[in-house]
Amino acid sequence: MAQRAYPSIIATLLIAVVAFSCSPVNQSLKRSKKLASAGLTYEATTMALEALERKPGHQKAMIQVKTYGEKEIKAQLHEFDRLAEAGETVSALDAFVRARDLEDRANRAGVLLLGTSAHMSEYNILKRDYVKDLVQKGQQSLDQGDFTGAERTFARALKYSPEDNALQDLWRAALAEPLHREAHRLYDNQKYRTAFYIWADLEQEIGEPYKNSRQYQDSAVFHGMVTVGVRDILAPTRQELTLSQSMRADLINNLVRTEDPFIDWINWNDQTRYQASEQPDYLLEMEMTDWTEVPGTMSRYERQGYRKEILDKKNPDTGEVTKETVYHKVVYFDIDYRVYIHGALKFSLVDPIKGSILTSKEVEEQSERIVASAEYSGDPAHLYPGQWSSISEAKTTDQVLTSKKGQLDGRMKTSYNPRIIDDMREAVKNSLVNKTSVTLIQALNSPLFLQ
């Protein structure tokens, strides 16, 4: 028993070794070694850092980061000294920044790298005049209205002095001022929605409000807010009316969850309409244009295979008995009873004052499922070459009724599960709600509606 277990253990270990060597972390470390062998120490260090960041605490990755990182930082600092003495200020500063970035990134990953602090004073002296010149150029670009050039100049200065708060403020001003002015122009032209989102994008870009952007966003919402009343869904039959009522409730929930700051959704049912003193700015009218259920559609599939039979064959001359394999062609059937459900919903966004339709869309969804199936119940082991691919035993949740859906011979079994139809109705209804919600929000976000 122990001897038979050895091959399986060895195979397991081999599979584990292969899986380990093929992991993304180990592949990155292998590439890192190849880069270091080619003399590309900086690229080798960054590749090892990527592996360590992907899997923190990986010992092999930490060793490679430490080994290659120390070597590369020394090389970059040596380059910094050489270029500084040669008067190549920009190249010297870039060399120091590369060393500093490697050091900071490794320290964040848990590998302590040192070296830049000993050259910090020389770096500060060298960058002082250069950054001062960049700030002056950026300020001139700001005064001339060249915000793109100013933003690029301040971003380059921040590369060398990332902790300078005054420089950060200048960079934010260069980036935000043109957007801020454009939002003000749209606000003055009553394009409140567009102006609001420009201010919101501006704040996300610079990481904080700019000047009075928050106050103007609140003002834009105040002036641009509209109310949309959701009417009952018109349905031609009682069954569709029951579906439309639950669909309408789900639709309102979806619309409210969008949290659009400019739209106040109102459940505009009969009771609300009679009690309300004011009309909504817009009305959402919906109609169930189609709800089709087609049960009992039968499809029949005929398949062919071979039944294997082993016979004893006796030689009449010698009397010797041999085994002979014979294949008998057989035909078997697979019969499905499908239910098809299709739903369609039309909605129109109406201006109640003008009586005009602002937008009109129609969405639809369909589903088809097998609710009853008749399947061959013979032994698949006697079929060759195993073409039968749809054998499935009746589940415990199925209702097996062998006397319904037609009389089938002994080779067939029938399963019937009418609960699938309820699931299909729910699935089609939910899909209609989701599609209507998406299409409606897209229509409302169109510049032709709210601006």
Image (tube, helix red, strand yellow):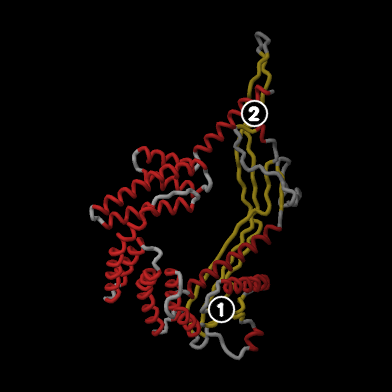
Examine the rendered structure and indicate whether residue 190 appears above or below residue 62: below
Question: Within 10 Å of the Cα at label 2, are there few (<14), some (14-19), or many (20+) other Cα atoms?
Answer: some
Question: Within 10 Å of the Cα at label 1, are there few (<14), some (14-19), or many (20+) other Cα atoms?
Answer: some
Quadrant for the N terminus, please: top right
Q: Position of residue 337 (x, y in %)?
A: 65, 53
Secondary structure beneath dot 2 equals: strand
Give left or right: position of 253 versus 216.
Answer: right
Residue where numbered disc 1 is placed = 285
Give the Cα distance between marks 2 and 1. Answer: 66 Å
Residue pictured at 72% horizontal, 46% vertical = 394
User: Depth-wise, is mark 2 or mark 1 nearer the camera?
Assistant: 1
Give left or right: position of 193 versus 323.
Answer: left
Identify the residue at the far left of this view: 86
* Contact flag, marks 2 and 1 (Cβ < 8 Å): no
Q: Position of residue 187 (x, y in %)?
A: 41, 82
Whether residue 449 is visible: no
* Residue 168, quarter of picture: bottom left
Examine the rendered structure and indicate whether residue 5 appears above or below residue 401: above
* Residue 334, quarter of picture: top right
Q: Position of residue 214 (x, y in %)?
A: 47, 79
Identify the residue at the far top of this view: 318
* Mark 2 residue type: Lys
Whether residue 239 is visible: yes
Query: Between disc 2 and disc 1, whose residue precedes?
Result: 1
Residue pictured at 64% horizontal, 33% vertical = 383
Quadrant for the C terminus, please: bottom left
Residue where numbered disc 2 is placed = 308
